[in-house]
Image: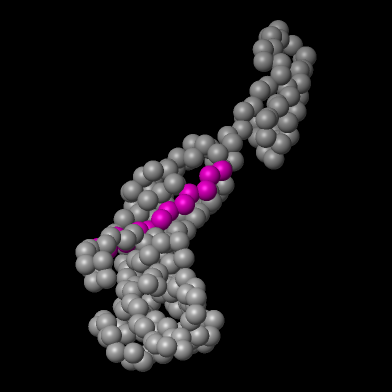
Amino acid sequence: SCDIIANVQTSSPVCSGGTITVSCSEILGVNDYKWYFLGSTPNETIGTGMLIAEGNNVTGFQRDATMANAGWYALDISNEFDTSRFFNYVVVTESPTNLTLNSSATNLCSGQPVTLTVSASNADTYTWNTGSHNNPLNVTPNATTTYTVTASKTQTVYDPKLEQDVTNTCGLSASATVNVTAMPMVSISPSHVQLCESSSATTTLTATCNNGNVTYKWGTNPMQTGNSITV
């Protein structure tokens, strides 16, 4: 016998948007292969159906996994003595489409919240790489983080070849990166200064920050800038 499979690794079902691979292991003595698409009804009559591929060594072919390409496939194999027909059925289940992922902000300071909102056509569930299924997803990242969401559609379809229902989940993913800048930590040196009242003495205060990309504004009157001031 010759088995036609819907996928090189596993049999059907296949997600729409993927590829149907129909193939047959080599049979000794076969001179000719003819592959047919039969649609929803198997037909045992040799040569019936829509011819998809043919040739002496055409042991398989690929088609786009669309809903229209789901159904029965037949292989007519011939040698000098006879022609035999073999069948298999390909189940195609619908994948989500039109997936969009929006972020309320892409650049934040550490500890600030952000909201991620996802939408898709033909999706049952959303799963984030955080483990959440919420939509929208509210997060407060402390470091730059990439959030990935998978929109999924699960369907149960009857497979007439297996004579049983088969369940398949199809998914579509998108990612968004939220850039987080650490909150600056500032120290002032000296941290304590003692001057006599009415003294004309001055002191210099120097601020140091763990983030070099900062500006300094001192609460003096008038306001002074820069990391070092004299008061």
Question: Image quadrant of residue 231?
Answer: top right
The overriding secondary structure of the stretch rendered in magenta is strand
**Is residue 55 shown left or right of residue 90?**
right
Question: Image quadrant of residue 200?
Answer: top right
Viewer-nearest residue: 158 or 87:
87
Rendered position, 152 above or below 183: below
Residue 52 x/y as whole percent: 44, 86
**Is residue 198 shown left or right of residue 65?**
right
Viewer-nearest residue: 139 or 196:
139
For the point 39% across and 43% down, which residue is it?
131
Q: Which residues lie in the magenta part?
A: 144-157
Taking the image as drawn, is residue 157 in sight? no
**Is residue 94 shown left or right of residue 174?**
left
Residue 8 x/y as whole percent: 46, 65
For the point 36% across and 92% down, which residue is it?
47
Residue 109 x/y as whole percent: 54, 41
Rendered position, 191 above or below 214: above
Q: Is residue 150 magenta?
A: yes
Q: How is the image coloured?
A: one colour
For the point 33% across and 49% down, which residue is it?
134
Q: Is residue 102 magenta?
A: no
Viewer-nearest residue: 88 or 171:
88
Question: Image quadrant of residue 82?
Answer: bottom left
Q: Quadrant of the N terminus?
A: bottom left
Residue 21 x/y as whole percent: 45, 72
**Is residue 190 shown left or right of residue 78?**
right
